[in-house]
Image (spheres, helix red, strand yellow):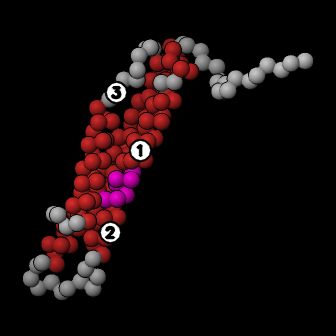
Amino acid sequence: MVSQPADENPPRFEVHVTSDSHFSWLRTRLSVERTLMSWVRTAVSLIGFGFTIVQFFERFQDMQGVAPALRPQSPRVLGLALILAGVGALAVSLWQYRSLLRYLWSKQFAQLAGVDEDPHKTPLFAVTIVLLLIGIFTFIAVLFRLV
């Protein structure tokens, strides 16, 4: 008795093309977009707050009548940590976004998507890339005291 070789990547479940499954696919696709938007909002807040802490305490130390800080580098280190956390959050969210889109646009779900073309690009991906570059620039600027 000869056994048949198993399929290398068997589908985990059977996909039936119905209007319900198509709209479920669309809801999932939009959920991925909302998740990335939430990550972007959080990361921008971290980057902005980190930069603000650095700038505020540098200006605060320059004011007359203010006692010198015990640890004058602490706000800068905290600001750099927050900026780095924001940049890291953007990088992780982009990786997660791309992997989820690759899965949703796989052959298994091609019929549910309703199109036979490449995945549709959204402006959110480009905005996230630009914000990632801004975050990296901000980190470098604060690290080397360019601002």
Distance from the alpha carbon under mark 3 to that under mark 2: 36 Å
State if disc 1 and disc 2 touch (CB < 8 Å).
no
State if disc 2 and disc 3 touch (CB < 8 Å).
no
Binning the other alpha carbons within 10 Å of mark 1 as few (below 14), some (14 to 19) or many (20 upward) gives many
Residue at 27% in and 85% down: 70
Residue 48, magenta (yes or no): no
Q: What secondary structure characterizes most of the magenta part?
A: helix
Q: Earlier in the sequence, mark 2 or mark 1?
A: 2
* Above or below 87: residue 17: above
* Above or below 14: residue 46: below
Nearest the eye: 1 or 85: 1
Magenta segment: 83-89
Give x and y (percent) for residue 56.
19, 69
Would residue 4 be found to the left or right of residue 123 on screen? right
Q: Residue furthest right?
A: 1
Query: Which residue corresponds to mark 2?
Result: 78
Residue at 9% in and 82% down: 64
Q: Amino acid at mark 2?
A: Leu
Give x and y (percent) for residue 141.
21, 61
Residue at 50% in and 18% down: 110
Q: Amino acid at mark 1?
A: Ser
Query: Which residue corresponds to mark 3?
Result: 121
Residue 2, image quadrant: top right
Q: Secondary structure at mark 2?
A: helix
Would residue 71 be found to the left or right of residue 27 on screen? left
Quadrant of the frame with the C terminus: bottom left
